[in-house]
Amino acid sequence: MISSDVIRGHIDTIILKLLMEKDMYGYELANEISLRTKNKFDIKEATLYAVVQRLEMKNLIQSYMGEKSHGGKRRYYKVTPFGRAYYSETISEWKLLKEIMMAILGSDIS
Amino acid sequence: MNKIKRFVASLLKDFFNEADKKELIEILSTSLQEKIDDLVESGTPLEDAVKISMQEFGSTKDVLDAFQDESSKLKADLRIRRRSQLIFSIFGYFIIVGLCVFLNLTLLPIFNDFLWFVVVAIGLLFWPVVMGYRYYLAVK
């Protein structure tokens, strides 16, 4: 289990990536993260929803009210063009970071 | 929904300006309500769904984690505000008690036999003590 403290700087990127694949509502995002990481990444919903709000304030994502297939309405989020550009930029940084870490820790982590 | 909003508002009560707080409460409450709706739709009784959602939601610290750049500033603002409240309560306490001593011993000699200002002084102690405790929590 990894806490949000360790991965904090990358939560924005994770959310943008998931929303680029498919529009989702808040709790759906939380479920998707748990599912994909097999519950190894423990992000509190309070943090996740607050990050989503922050991303919306920065115009990286935008929300709209949509229907859920069964049940009430949900506030869905989708990535804006600005969000996609920001995502590409963070991925480039991530690749560079990975190269640096591999160059130093390579034999220990491979 | 009101219960949910009250719960979220209680987490944020000491942080953010009013406009940001209002928007954040709206977003967090909506997401929390959606989780409750999902749980209810999957067969969980409403009462249990509300309870589970609130328990799993997280704390004030978890909300502030999302604003890592601003969270130290928000905490510093809170400490300053709580310290001002503590100083104000200490001054207020001494001014009110001083006034009572003056009234008790000089202006109202009829009550000279009974030092009623002591009752006021003890009763009013809750004010700086509570403010001191709130400051302690903010510093901690």
Image (spheres, grey):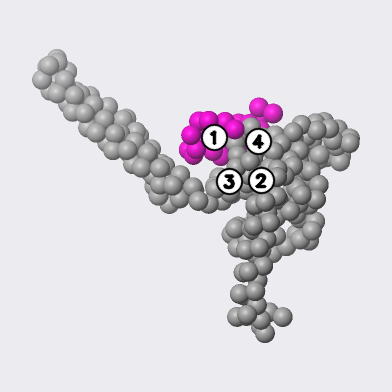
Q: Main secondary structure of the magenta part?
A: helix
Against A54, residue B96 (above or below) is: above
**In the image, what residue type sits under mark 3?**
Val
Q: Please state which of the two labelled residues, at mark 2 or mark 3, is closer to the viewer.
A: 2
Residue B63 is labelled as 3
Q: Is residue B118 visible?
A: no
Q: CA distance from mark 2 to mark 3?
A: 24 Å
Question: Between B84 and B49, which is closer to the camera in this rendering?
Answer: B84
Residue most extreme to the bottom: A107
Q: CA distance from mark 2 to mark 1?
A: 22 Å
Rendered residue at 65%/77% (across/down): A102
Q: Which residue is mark 4?
A: B27
Could you say which quadrant of the image residue A4 lies in?
Answer: bottom right
How far across and how far down the image is residue B47, in percent? 76, 35
Label 4 vs 3, first from the N-terminus: 4
Asked if badges 2 and 4 are on one and the same chain, I answer no
Q: CA distance from mark 1 to mark 4?
A: 11 Å
Q: Which residue is mark 1?
A: B20
Q: Element under label 1?
A: helix
Q: Which residue is mark 2?
A: A82
Quarter of the picture containing the N terminus of chain B is top right
